[in-house]
């Protein structure tokens, strides 16, 4: 179900082209191990991704050479992760829609809920999806506010309505959207610091604070 493109001559050869479904993938030893390690990490924050990753990992485990399977098992046994606070679940379809809108430069009409639970309708020009501290953010130009804004993806209601195209604007100061989102969601943007006494057990408080 997939085409094979070939060329003749001394420098000729063949390559698989895109078809209706995924063809068998040709991976070398390092690539196979890297993919297995990445799949083992999973992504529990996007619904469906972790499950699909585990299915892919099971298929890859079946064809890994014995020496690579042993190396992978040693890595799995040795690597531990620092527990992180549970992140809000988001749908893979939402991520795909927002990513496509960024890539195709199409306006988005959103129903958005802010941190106080207030719902508003926004018309935005999406630029980048940013993953920070296990949360997904959309960096976009808000036409109503006439300013750059950061939107948490888990607070965007579905379905998302796609509009027409737009001409990209100059990026925020510095031109780095990851830095912009980090700045706009970080405590460092506030001018004051405070010492706070929590009347709660340490375990309860720790669960609310990202390890980083």
Image: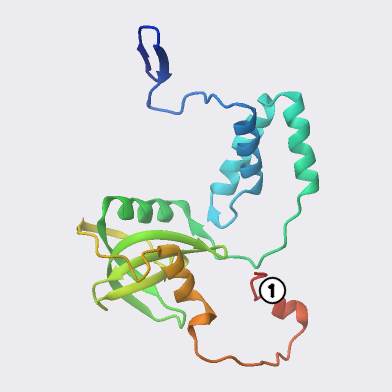
Horizontal placement of 58 versus 80: left or right?
A: left
Rendered-image quadrant of the N terminus? top left
Q: Whole-percent x and y of residue 24?
A: 51, 23
Q: Residue at x 58, y 52 (%)?
A: 43
Horizontal placement of 94 versus 70: left or right?
A: left
Up the image or down, 162 lies above or below 86; here it is above
Horizontal placement of 97 versus 81: left or right?
A: left
Q: Residue at x 40, y 81 (%)?
A: 118
Q: Secondary structure at mark 1?
A: loop
Q: Tell me the residue that label 1 is attached to.
A: 207
Q: Is residue 183 visible?
A: yes
Q: Is residue 159 visible?
A: no
Rendered-image quadrant of the C terminus? bottom right
Q: Residue at x 78, y 32 (%)?
A: 70
Q: Whole-percent x and y of residue 37?
A: 66, 42
Residue nearest the observer in this picture, 54 or 32: 32
Q: Whole-percent x and y of residue 15?
A: 42, 19
């Amino acid at each position: 179900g997939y085409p094979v493109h070939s060329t003749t001559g001394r420098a000729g050869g063949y390559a698989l082209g895109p078809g209706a479904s995924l063809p068998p993938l040709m991976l070398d030893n390092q690539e196979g191990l890297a993919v297995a390690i990445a799949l083992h990490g999973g992504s529990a924050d996007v619904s469906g991704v972790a499950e699909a990753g585990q299915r892919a990992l099971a298929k890859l485990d079946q064809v890994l050479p014995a020496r690579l399977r042993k190396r992978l098992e040693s890595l799995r046994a040795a690597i531990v992760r620092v527990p992180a606070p549970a992140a809000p679940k988001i749908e893979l379809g939402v991520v795909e829609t927002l990513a496509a809108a960024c890539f195709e430069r199409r306006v988005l009409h959103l129903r958005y809920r802010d941190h106080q639970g207030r719902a508003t309708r926004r018309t935005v020009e999406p630029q980048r999806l940013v993953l920070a501290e296990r949360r997904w953010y959309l960096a976009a130009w808000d036409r109503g506010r006439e300013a750059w804004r950061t939107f948490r993806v888990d607070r965007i209601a579905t379905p998302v309505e796609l509009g027409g195209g737009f001409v990209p604007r100059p990026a925020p100061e510095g031109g780095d959207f990851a830095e912009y989102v980090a700045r706009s969601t970080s405590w460092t943007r506030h001018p004051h610091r405070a010492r706070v006494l929590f009347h709660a057990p340490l375990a309860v408080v720790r669960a609310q604070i990202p390890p980083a």
